[in-house]
Amino acid sequence: MIDYINRFWIADVDARMQVFDLKTSYQFQTQPGVDRYNMPLYNLQTQTTGVNAQPSIASYPVYQGFVSPAYINGIQTPLQTQKNNFFNVWPNVTQNAATFTQGNGTTGPYTITVPLSPGNQTPLNNPVNAILRGHVDITGIIATAANVDPPVGTTINTAIPTTSIFPAVYFTATNTDGSNIVVSDSGQFLTSNINLGLLMTPGSAPYGNTALVNGYTTTQNTINYLTGVATNVYFPTAIPSGVTIYCQYYYFQTGLPRSILYYNNTLTLRSPPDRQYLIEMDAYLSPAAFFNTEAAIPFGYMAEYIARGAARKILSDTGDVEQFQFYEPLFKEQELLVWKRSQRQWTNDRTQTIYSQGINNGQNGLNNIGGTSI
């Protein structure tokens, strides 16, 4: 029974309608130099004791989605969902530069300094420039079976699909046969320091990415995003002597973010933050699971709706078409009542026009309280 309730409550309600009582706010603090943040996931939910013991419910998004208004340190900021609009204003210009490192006929180790490296202090002290770092999206976080974002470890987690990893730094060279030799960052970070990105050999989908040989430490096969130095890197193939190693990367001046892109369950900030900033936006909550029949329903007026929704699934699974058809109008009635309650809340506000947008938003600002012609 609890399983049927959860299936309806978690998976169906938010898809059928946006309930006013599930509208809430999402807040988080930025990390200096980090421009991409995934939607948060619920931790593993399970009940392992008692007569109502149920299997575990794996991670799923805490929120159904984000909507305007969005604020950064209390100042309203555009929240966009179209990549072309966002990157037309904030283009990701790829820097493609030769490094001062050349091949010596071996796979490594090579210590490579990114051209125009930020040279920030460690620990960080108000950086003015940043090398953007690789990213693992929400699907990749789920694939790790651990709700740790970004992923950390002492080696590359090969359970993350290649389609969920978006590198931001590449080191490249040309082999004697003309083929590429490529190492990139992985969106995964060293356990002891999340400003040290783990480097990898990119591979084919679905699980072709591989770790570099000889392991990972603070001194090996990592890139320091604050200083721009990749230390003791081992390439998958020997780099011929005298061949230049190139670097592709995104280089930004950090500061107060002024725009947000929501795409692929990821929030991207521009400019990348130079320190901690409070991000706030409206969101629709995905409810947590129920684990026993005695648990109180958070919104009592939805009790019959949830019950009839669960019963609907039971009748559907058992193939009792006659009873399903009998109960369907009763289910629809309850759904309409729940929807109507939300609509009463939405219609409480006046429909906005150019003459009712608040201070200084009408023509010349003269039609609003506090308006001015200046």
Image (cartoon, grey):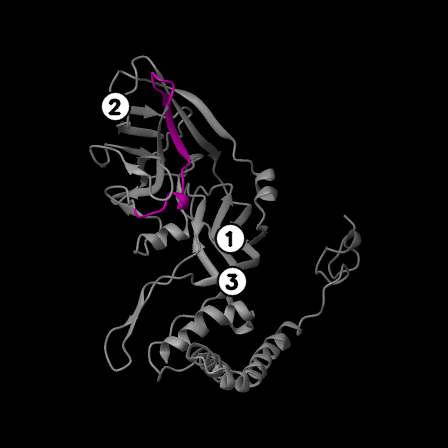
**Picture quadrant of residue 357:** bottom right
Residue type marked 2: Thr
**Picture quadrant of residue 154:** top left
Residue type marked 3: Ala
Q: Is residue 170 magenta?
A: yes
Residue designated by label 1? 73
* Magenta stretch in the rendered image: 159-179
Q: Earlier in the sequence, mark 1 or mark 3?
A: 1
Q: Is residue 331 magenta?
A: no
| Residue plotted at (41% across, 77% down) | 5
Pointers 3 and 2 in contact (C-beta within 8 Å): no
Looking at the rendered structure, the secondary structure element under dot 2 is loop
Q: Quadrant of the N terminus?
A: bottom left
Question: Can you give x and y, in whole percent of width and height, for residue 230 in the image?
Answer: 31, 29
Question: Can you give x and y, in whole percent of width and height, for residue 24 in the image?
Answer: 50, 66
Q: Is residue 194 left or right of residue 26?
A: left
Residue designated by label 3? 283
**354 vs 308: above or below:** above
Residue designated by label 2? 107
Q: Is residue 95 left or right of residue 53?
A: right
Measure the alpha-carbon separation of dots 1 and 3. 17 Å
Query: Closer to us: mark 3 or mark 2?
Result: 2
**174 vs 58: above or below:** above
